[in-house]
Amino acid sequence: MKKSILLLTVITITLMTACKNEKKLKDNPFFAEYSTPFQVPPFDKIDTTDYLPAFTEGIKQHDSEVAAITNNTSEPTFDNTILPFDKSGKMLKRVSKVFFNITESNTNDQLQGIAAKVSPMLSKHNDDISMNSKLFARIKTIYERRKDLKLDAQQIRVVEKYYRDFERQGANLTNDQQDQLRKINEELSGLSLKFGDNLLAETNKNFKLVIDNKADLDGLPEGVISAAAEAADKGGNKGKWVFTLAKPSLIPFLQYAKNRELREKIYRGYFMRGDNGNANDNNSTLTEIVRLRAEKARLLGFENYAAYVIDDNMAKTPSTVDAFLNKLMVASLPVAKAELSEMQKIADSEGGKFKLQSWDWWYYSEKLHKLKYDLDENELKPYFSLENVRNGMFAVAGKLYGITFTKVTNLPIYQKDVETFEVKEADGSHLGILYLDYFPRESKSGGAWCTDFQSAGWENGKKVDPVISMVCNFTPPTGDMPALLNFDETSTLFHEFGHALHGLFSLGQYNRTAGNVPQDYVELPSQVMENWAADPQVLKMYAKHYKTGEVIPDKLIAKIEKSGLFNQGFVTVEYLAASILDLDYHELASPAKVEPETFEKEAMAKAGLIPEILPRYRSTYFAHIFSGGYAAGYYVYIWAAVLDADAFDYFKQSGDIFNPELAAKFRKNCLAESGDDEGMIQYKKFRGQEPSMDPLLKRRGLK
């Protein structure tokens, strides 16, 4: 009798659990099309527990879709193989786009734990597809007959892209080699995740400069002091001042704090991230990443990982990039050395009996800036409130492309500070949705980026509208003062907005090619927008005093223009140094155990870097290449800068920076149809010729 009761109880509990699980899966917002306005993610309904079941089901559905293609006994065609594969994995993409964006912008321990579980699952799933011999055989058959199948130009391009993808992902390897590649990919995905988690902790949790002596704040602007006081209050240090490694806190301290010892302390906290011998040390992690990438490249038939990556880019070979970077370094190093000499004279004249160090650069360059150009950044900031800058970039897009931005407040958001806007074409038709996430928080990675929750595309003959997200780490508002941006932050907002426009305008019938461009083309749409941010005509459109509404005076605009070449030696050299460091790591053919500190010192010495300048990212916090997608590709920013400087010069030469004919050509060829052909071909359709390096060199004062 007792056994029967016990068995009945177990059965009842099992059934109840099954019902709860079934209900939970039914309620999981990722399991169906979003019913929200504009089909944005239902952030108000997404629970952390929804992610893992959605990933599991998404993988299952994608596997089923691929199996349907490979089990088709009909002769492989574009319509029964390429097209269904191109449109497959919809649910998996849906959950992935939300999850990985949120883990970057608003993470927590639970999400990081899920990421650790999901990462190997996705690595295996991707390898299962890219090494699926039946699927590759069908794609190969179509590829070999592509010119005889009456396909249009875009269909042929999609076939060629997928065939090349499969080759680059190991489809032609032997079974043993594929097993080896699978293991490498799984290890790399885990190591990349670990590197990013370590850096997040080092940046947002493991260092704070707590000041309790007001005298140590000498030189700092009132707004910076107020922000530090608010940070202290929030962190349980009432009556003190807290500075962090987030750029809006770090950079003003380096620029203005008179206490040299404290400037050194906070800068050391910044440049020693991931290099402190603690639980978050990244040395062994990056060493293993470098080794595994070299092994992967060799397995796939490339001399090194840089050759593997750049083979798919506009540059084509590492030697092309090396020559490009070295040419720029030769031009910019003398300029940086001259800047250093001028700053040293200021320090000497003030009685400073020391040789300038890396933590002095911001402080003395600010003094030099004021001395040479009579321009104090704090004189500018009142004209660059976040709201005015945002409205300014919207106005620029309106004048160029006729689009409008309307704030909407009925959309679910993932964090209270996020703003949402509906984007419409000139005729009033819906184009897409834009999310804006502005301020730092402990749950957010550093830097700024643009991503999407839904890419533009086509499905079943119907256009899918994009949902784009811009994420930044700007100086937040304090007290009654709104968020006031420095000019670097202003340029950053315009930069990320350029990426957003690329995502909003992208057109194409096929997921593989719509908006899909080489890595060294990616930054053209973003960087070109920075040119408008600094143009005098545009400044008068949006740079207005946050209290009085006064348009920025001509004398300040003249100072901004005059000082445009200021500190460009430093800016260019620190960037080039990081780009060279990236390539040096990834040009290693078969690295033994790399010792990062020694390797970095030798690489920088070879590049001629002066000790007063550190590479923009040292190895242990170089997230772009060790936890982001820029491995062997950090050079792309300045490669694309050649394109963006040349493109804006084209507008200026026309006599109208809002030239409607050129804007239409740029939108069509460089944004909307950017994936229709190779990057340089698309650029030449707009420009009519290959880009010249002269506008970039002139813009930076290197010529």
Image: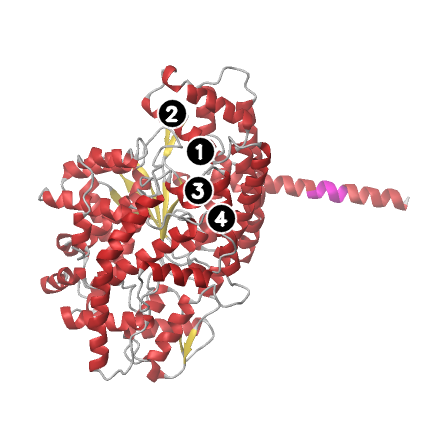
Q: Nearer the viewer, mark 1 or mark 2?
A: 1
Tags 1 and 2 in contact by the CB under 8 Å rule? no
- The mark that comes first in sequence, 2 or 4, is 2
Closer to the chain start, of discs 4 and 3, is 3
Cα distance, mark 3 to mark 2? 43 Å
Within 10 angstroms of label 1, few (less than 14), some, or many (20 or more) residues? some
Give the amino acid type for the residue marked by disc 2 in the picture: Gly
Range drawn in magenta: 12-17
Residue position marked by numbered label 2 in the rendering: 461
Q: Earlier in the sequence, mark 3 or mark 2?
A: 3
Query: Disc 1 to disc 2, how far (Cα)?
Result: 26 Å
Q: In terms of image quadrants, where is residue 621?
A: bottom left
What colour scheme has been applied to the protein in the rendered image? secondary structure
Mark number displayed over residue 423:
none
User: Rounded to the nearest whole Å, what is the CA distance between mark 1 and mark 4?
Assistant: 24 Å
Q: Earlier in the sequence, mark 1 or mark 3?
A: 1
Q: Residue at x 48, y 36 (%)?
A: 169
Labels 1, 4: front one: 4
Q: CA distance from mark 1 to mark 3?
A: 18 Å
Res 590 label: 4
The quarter in which the N terminus is drawn is: top right
Amino acid type of the residue that numbered disc 1 sits on in the rendered structure? Asp
* Disc 3: CA contacts within 10 A as few (<14), some (14-19) or many (>=20): some
For label 3, the residue is: 303
Provide the residue designation for mark 1. 165
